[in-house]
Image (cartoon, helix red, strand yellow):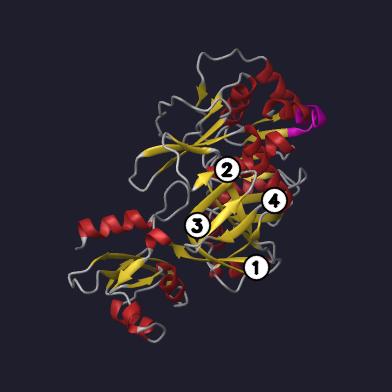
Amino acid sequence: MLYDRWREIARAHSSEVALRDLGSQRDWTFAQVAADVEASPKANRTIAFPQGMSADFVFEVLRAWRHGQVVCPLEIGQLPTFFEHLSIDCVHLKTTSGTTGAARAIAFTAAQLAADAQNIVTTMGLRPEWPNLGTISLAHSYGFSNLVLPLLLHGIPLALVSSPLPEALRRAASSEACVTVAAVPALWRAWHESNSIPPNLRLAISAGAPLPLAVETAVFLRGGLKIHNFYGASECGGIAYDRTATPRTDASCVGSAMENVRLSAADSSCLEVQSPAVGETYWPTPETVLANGRFQTSDLAEIREGQVHLRGRASDQINIAGRKVSPEIIERMLLTHPAVSECLVFGVPSHDAARSEMIVACVASRQHLAPESLREFALDRLAAWLVPRHWVIVDSFPVNQRGKLSRLEWRQHFLENVL
């Protein structure tokens, strides 16, 4: 199914440029990509593990589709996992980790992958005359669904950028009349602060982590460019998208449901997704939260007038003397401080058994900040029991290769090095 669709796309766009690898300074038309894949011998394996940020990743995916191999993208440095007893209909595996950190995968059929690509192209309005600039991991669900699948199943050209550094982005964009960029908040912030967002950027998308309102607004005020917040999950692909033409005013709002996606709040207040793009199952151990075209996330949510408002993750809630609080509530308040660029809030065990947990706030500041001044700022805006007990001031937050801040990793770091 997937390879047949690719062949249709290659025939329809044969003479057009499909793929540019700016690192190697090479490009291929759709016909040239198709010819290379057709000439490739079949590898003696059942699973292909494309890896990296080069054209080879795309070619390996197509070769796997042609020869009936399962595709399991890997991040740079990630080792292959041994898979057995996979469903005969499984064509794609997304690697992830459970709450215990144990490796596991999400299995997808061809129809589910194609549905996610269709939802993204239709909802976002991706178009061939606005090629995608690839600055994010192709192996991650976000990059694979927004960059690789639109190229192979919808003919949206892809230019792979050698580096996400500002100058590399500018050079990459200069080779096209108009471009689309799907990135993560950390990159949007860096590009804005270096004044390097290309003037010919026509569609800007941000996912992988919450997009700060300050970044979204600042980019819009400088050049009129709206960054569209995109919310999804590995298990089901795209969930919601901010279609509006002006910056959001509520950081909790992540947009409205993607095309062909139905959303509801389950009895637990966690967001439930129903869509043809929802994955088949977890491997090696299925779970009831992912089955039969339905995925129940761990994100607490409200749906108001069609807009999805996230209220934190059920697993991240902090227990203060029997009262539950979402760390996002405190983070959004702290981000209103003019000197705070980023922050991360989490709970750790309290020495006072009656409190269960105490709140820790890690804050990245644009200037010198004293914890006491932050505490006073918080006391003016929050109930006293919501004010963090511990403050950690840092220059910046390093993110992982998917552009995310890991609350779990920072909590563990605090427990090991501070308490």
* CA gap, disc 2 and disc 3: 27 Å
Local SS, label 4: loop
Q: Earlier in the sequence, mark 2 or mark 1?
A: 1
The amino acid on which the numbered mark 3 sits, given as a three-letter code, is Ala
Return the x and y of residue 40 as percentages of the image width and height. 62, 15
Label 2 close to label 3 by CB (< 8 Å):
no
Label 4 close to label 1 by CB (< 8 Å):
no
Residue name at image x 17 percent, y 70 percent? 351
Q: Is residue 161 visible?
A: no
Q: Earlier in the sequence, mark 2 or mark 3?
A: 3
- How packed mark 1 is, by other alpha carbons closer than 10 Å (few <14, some 14-19, many 20 or more), is some
What's drawn in magenta, residue-wise?
9-17
Q: Nearer the viewer, mark 1 or mark 3?
A: 3
User: From the viewer's perspective, is residue 323 above or below residue 126?
Assistant: below
Residue annotated with mark 1: 220
* CA gap, disc 4 and disc 3: 23 Å
Q: Nearer the viewer, mark 4 or mark 3?
A: 4
The amino acid on which the numbered mark 2 sits, given as a three-letter code, is Asn
Q: Earlier in the sequence, mark 4 or mark 1?
A: 1
The amino acid on which the numbered mark 1 sits, given as a three-letter code, is Phe
Give the camera-side residue of 377 and 109. 109
